[in-house]
Amino acid sequence: MEIFKDLSNPASKEFEKLLNTQLSKINIEEGKIIDGKINKITEKFVFLFVEGLKSEPVLDINELKSLGLKDKIKVGETIPVLLEKIEDRNGEILVSASKAKKIKGWDKLVEAYEKNEPIMGKITSKCKGGCIVEHIDTGSLMFLPGSQISDKPLKDISHLMNEPQKFALIKLDKIRGNACVSRKEIISSFKKEDKAKIISKYKIGDIIKDAEVKGYSSFGCFFNVNNELDVLVHLQEISYSRVNHPDEVFNIGEKHDLKVISVDKEKLQVGCSVKQLSPDPFEHIENYNLDKTYKAKVVKIMDFGAFCELEPGLTTLLHSSELSWTKKNVSTKKMFKVGDEIDCVITEIDKEKRRVAISHRLTQKNPYEVFEKNHPVGSIVEGDVVNKNEYSLFVKIKNYDLDAFLHCNDLTYLNNGEEELNKYNKGDKIKVKVLEIKTSEQKIRVGLRQTKTDPFDWFKNKKENQTITVKIISTDNKGLIVRPEGCEMDFPIKKSQIAINSADARPSRFTGGERIDCAIAELDLNKRKVILSIKLLEEIEKKEALDKYGAEGSGKNLPFSSLSEDLKKKDEDKK
């Protein structure tokens, strides 16, 4: 014990020197991978000898078997392990063979990633968004996104499962220890070499025969050339005329000749043109005149019309509004089919926009002009009710494919127009009068009541302030409904126009059926407006009495209670 207490003696110094020399030879650190030699094996554990450690680390046999190291479980074999703890709470040394293998595998992945080298792996299972790939050399697990499985969409990948194949490392997260791989990149790299050889065969000006339409995009159309190359025809290279989308000109599966206009060996792209195979038709557009009839070939049918060719390469638009004079929202598919040759009239030539518009209906006579010539405003025509809505009828005129508009207010003079409308149904035959023709707007307005005598004509020989006899039809709180004798129309007398005295202005004074006199307060034959008033008649008669009987006493014999007072007032006014 004395030797350890007294460190200044020569023996202690010599022991310290030997101890330091021995420890300096062995560098033991936590977190490092070290080699351990098997010196003892039991049923469940393997004991390792590591020089420099105070005790023997222990490994679980099952851990070694799961790592595929069953053959190495022999005394004297060396196994790499990760030194996690030199001494834990129990004073034991903690090591891990699986973590050592993972770290060594990660180092290999990092090396391959930095050198941009492919690695060998196999797809072991599917997961959300892709698959799990096992690195064959180290057993490390990596993620394969679904978009990186192949360069083409695959519905079934069962043939790729557990098959050793090359993968490219596309992403490594050193902090989290995650790796992302791609099979698509390996496939594309092989195809890239083949594609470069294929593209080297083409040069600007070459003509490609029978390229098949493969797909569309907003900027052009893709063609498949001999099942070895996809080329792009830009939207501007499809036709000399304006094209909004490739599907206006091409259909999937069609075959067309193409002209090579660009070759990019770096991007491995070939650009082609369809329109450059034919001369520019706008160079001789002067050969076509406006408002002249030409033959056009239907090349494509759309919902809004049809595209037609006046000559190869000169495509024009025939809008659905220019198909027919009379049919609205007409279907182009029902009128024409692709390949039909139709007559058309050129309505517009725009050299700057390189656009030509045509019309099919202009090749026929305008039926509205023909109708206006044969049946001017004021004519009586026959027709059938073909449609009806809440406020009007539509009448198909006999011998014409034209529909005329008949408003409910033009049905009758007598009743409410909306009530009268309920009396008519589809198929009813009626005679109507032409009220208005708008050829430019393709509209015809007709009336039914105009074909009959206007009962308002009863007032033609009448004038304002004239007295007429009427029959009371009905009464209500608002006033009276009366009908002049000899007239078929009913008119209202407002409550305020029943009497001079407000006490007598009561509609309840009348029961209905009485014959009374009233005066015409207002009359406008042009506007068909008339206002009747009993009050006005009383005022007129009162004035006449005052003019005729100027004495105060005479007024007492009259049936007007206020006449004497009015006479006094008149005398005072004279003074």
Image (cartoon, rainbow, N blue to C red):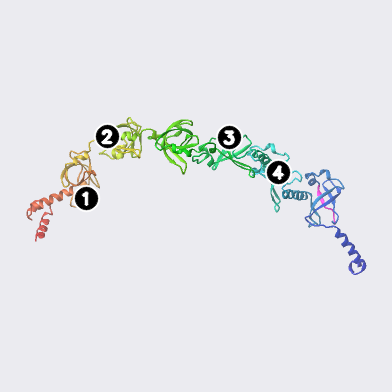
- Tag 3: residue type? Glu
Q: Position of residue 38 (x, y in %)?
A: 85, 49
Q: Mark 1 — residue?
A: 496
Quarter of the image where one finds residue 217: top right
- Tag 4: residue type? Phe
Quarter of the image where one finds residue 188: top right
Q: CA distance from mark 3 to mark 1?
A: 87 Å
* Quarter in which the N terminus is drawn: bottom right
The label nearer to you, 4 versus 1, is 4
Between 483 and 137, the one nearer to me in the picture: 137
State the SS at label 4: strand
- Tag 1: residue type? Ser
Label number found at residue 212: 3
State the SS at label 1: helix
Number of labels in the image equals 4
Q: CA distance from mark 4 to mark 3?
A: 33 Å
* Residue range (magenta): 54-60
State the SS at label 3: strand
The label nearer to you, 1 versus 2, is 2
